[in-house]
Image (cartoon, rainbow, N blue to C red):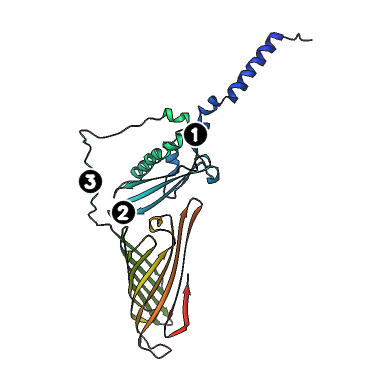
């Protein structure tokens, strides 16, 4: 039989008591990562693994419902060829009344590494308000790199040499050749947009060419089709919810039997949300009324070689970029005035 050691048992109880006390101590719990806010990053273009390493003073979560800070990142091209990121910091739960927004612009030609470094820096700055009540704040340092001999410049307005114009060129091609079949497909496009607070100018040129060659029973058969279209829209805002403008299009399409088409229509647009929120949520209703002239390649089933008709169109566009996800959709309906029983609806 072993003799019971009272002194050893007392020391054991004492150490157990200390462990319980320190485990339950709020100070001990807050000095580690447990005091860091739970953050959800909603960004399709971000390198999450890199950001997680560069911003270690928060707890990154994969479920937005667990987060007390939701960071929604959207991006768009700039007129100078760079990329502008907008970071919206959305507070939740105990931070529900603490929202903010920051911007980061990556210059033209910036590498992926430079862009992710810049995003990480802006993320650190934007997260500071959510650390105000945390002891982690005392471990952070703020630094400023002015550069050798740098002098703080006077506040001047930024000058954009492109005057807010953004250009983009797209192109693709496809070729398949067999002993009795040859297929060629070429596609191209050019956009020129200028989006400002007061004006929205959009131009798009679309080109498409397809050619098929067949050999069967000693006979050669060729099939060619093409499509080109130039669309332009000029819209002027006349208030936070209303805008007026004009829309025009010139096109030619083999499939539609159109040698040359011309459409010109003044328009009025209503935005359910103010235009300043266009980047996050947009619901617009646009009404167009104008003429549509068509010169056909072959005479139509109604006996027309060309015609000019007046039409009206109604277009509804919805685009949402929210913490819970993104939604995009549109519905358009139109008809000619001379016969309202004939109409077209597409989405």
Please give the residue where the numbered disc 1 appears in the rendered image.
36
Can you tell which quarter of the image residue 129 is in?
A: top left
Q: Residues within 10 Å of mark 2 (few under 14, many from 20)?
A: many
Q: Nearer the viewer, residue 243 or 248?
A: 243
Q: Horizontal and vertical percent for residue 317?
A: 44, 65
Q: Residue at x 51, y 32 (%)?
A: 35
56 displayed left or right of 79: right
Q: CA distance from mark 2 to mark 1?
A: 35 Å
User: Which residue lies most toward the front here?
Assistant: 239
Which of the marked residues, 2 or 1, is nearer the chain's N terminus?
1
Q: CA distance from mark 1 to mark 3?
A: 39 Å
Q: Horizontal and vertical percent for residue 183?
A: 39, 72
Please give the residue where the numbered disc 2 appears in the rendered image.
78
Q: Horizontal and vertical percent for residue 146?
A: 26, 35
Q: Relative to 4, does residue 189 appear above or below in the rendering?
A: below
Q: Relative to 222, does residue 92 appear above or below in the rendering?
A: above
The numbered dot on residue 156 is 3
Work out whether residue 181 can be spotted: yes
Q: Nearer the viewer, residue 43 or 320?
A: 320
Q: Quadrant of the N terminus?
A: top right
Residue at disc 2, secondary structure: loop
Residue at disc 1, secondary structure: loop
């Amino acid at each position: 039989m072993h003799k019971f050691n009272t002194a050893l048992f007392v020391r054991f109880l004492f150490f157990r008591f200390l462990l319980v006390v320190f485990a339950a101590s709020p100070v001990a719990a807050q000095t580690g990562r447990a005091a860091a806010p739970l953050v959800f990053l909603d960004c399709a273009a971000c390198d999450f693994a890199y950001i997680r390493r560069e911003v270690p003073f928060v707890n990154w979560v994969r479920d937005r419902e667990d987060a007390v800070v939701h960071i929604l990142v959207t991006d768009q091209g700039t007129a100078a060829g760079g990329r502008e990121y907008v970071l919206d910091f959305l507070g939740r739960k105990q931070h529900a009344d603490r929202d903010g927004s920051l911007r980061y612009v990556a210059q033209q030609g910036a590498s992926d590494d430079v862009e992710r470094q810049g995003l990480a820096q802006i993320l650190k700055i934007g997260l500071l308000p959510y650390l105000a009540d945390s002891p982690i704040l005392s471990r952070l340092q703020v630094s400023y790199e002015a550069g050798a001999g740098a002098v703080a410049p006077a506040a001047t307005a930024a000058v954009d040499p492109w005057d807010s114009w953004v250009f983009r060129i797209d192109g693709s091609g496809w070729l398949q050749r067999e002993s009795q079949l040859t297929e060629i497909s070429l596609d191209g496009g050019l956009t020129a947009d200028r989006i400002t607070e007061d004006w929205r100018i959009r131009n798009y040129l679309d080109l498409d060419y397809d050619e098929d060659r067949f050999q069967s029973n000693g006979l050669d058969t060729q099939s060619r089709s093409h499509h080109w279209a130039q669309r332009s829209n000029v819209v002027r805002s006349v208030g936070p919810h209303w805008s007026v403008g004009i829309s025009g299009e010139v096109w030619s399409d083999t499939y539609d039997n159109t040698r040359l088409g011309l459409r010109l229509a003044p328009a009025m647009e209503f935005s359910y949300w103010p235009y300043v929120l266009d980047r996050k949520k947009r619901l617009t209703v646009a009404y167009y009324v104008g003429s549509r002239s068509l010169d056909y390649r072959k005479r139509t089933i109604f006996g027309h070689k060309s015609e000019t008709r007046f039409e009206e169109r109604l277009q509804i566009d919805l685009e949402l970029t929210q913490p819970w996800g993104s939604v995009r959709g549109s519905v358009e309906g139109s008809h000619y005035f001379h016969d309202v029983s004939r109409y077209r609806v597409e989405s």
